Amino acid sequence: MPADALQGLVGRRCTALDRRSKYILARFDGPASPVAMIHLGMTGRMIVEVVKPRTRRPDYRKHEHWRMDFGDRLVRFVDPRRFGALDVTPDADLNGHPLIRELGVEPLEEGFDGEFLHRVTRGRKVAIKQLLMNAKVVVGVGNIYASESCWHARVRPRRAAKSLTRRECDALAAATVKVLSAAIAAGGTSFRDYVGVDEDAGYFARELRVYERAGDACPRCGDLVKRAVQQGRSTYWCSGCQR
């Protein structure tokens, strides 16, 4: 955490919030237009509390590592496992920042489609689910949504990426967009400690078809949902309708 750069944000106004991959970008006014880059890690949470200006602030919570005070709003970062990150960079240097410059395409923006997916899978022996989660190729597709996207596209997640046909790439790209859009609309997927900024749970877990459903019947074909471990992460798929 760059202490001097963070101190440079004191007295500035946050003008916008946007995102690149899994980094939250908080933009501030003033010289150099600094950008605070925030990554939640695996267990990090940003909680926004309404507070009265010029009143005593609440004590730090357990595992609360930093906070930003905006007068009538208090933003608190809580991270039990300390995998989160915070950095500050001038806006002009953002795209060249080491955490940003090698990131791949955004699945919810122009440029991500079946043609793109077909092109980047050619010659790659890696499993298609692992490729979807490779941030240098596609950003923002986590473990849950990669399994779910493969199910919707009827593609077995452990297949070699290069084996997918153009039609399957079209289906997988469309499924990824569908799954991510639905998850955002539902406020995310709450397992264990995930909550939103108002400490409310995400409800996309109700829509999951295979993730954490090993041994259940597939809701599409009735065959068995299976589980395997790929690079330390659980992968789920239907043994009947995913090829």
Image (cartoon, grey):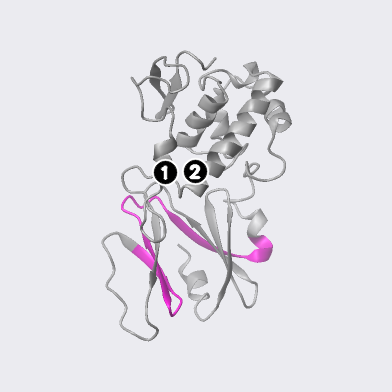
The residue labelled by disc 2 is 183
Quadrant of the snapshot with the N terminus = bottom left
Label 1 to label 2: alpha-carbon separation: 7 Å
Image location (x, y in percent) of residue 121: 66, 25
Up/down of 187 relative to 150, above or below? below
Q: Please, what secondary structure does the residue beneath circle 2 have?
A: helix
Residue 67 belongs to magenta span: yes
Relative horizontal placement of residue 78, taking residue 179 as reference (left or right):
left
Image location (x, y in percent) of residue 89: 59, 64
> Could you tell me if the residues under marks 1 and 2 are in contact, i.e. CB atoms within 8 Å?
yes
Q: Amino acid at mark 1?
A: Thr
Q: Which of the 4 image quadrants contains residue 127? A: top right
Q: Please, what secondary structure does the residue beneath circle 1 have?
A: loop
Could you tell me if residue 147 is visible in this image? yes
Q: Residue at x 69, y 34 (%)?
A: 113
The residue labelled by disc 1 is 189
Relative horizontal placement of residue 87, taking residue 216 as reference (left or right):
right
Could you tell me if residue 140 is visible in this image? no
Q: Residue at x 42, y 16 (%)?
A: 222
**Magenta segment, which residues?**
65-93
Up/down of 76 relative to 57, above or below? above
Up/down of 45 relative to 35, above or below? above
Return the disc, 1 or 2, that comes first in the chain's sequence: 2
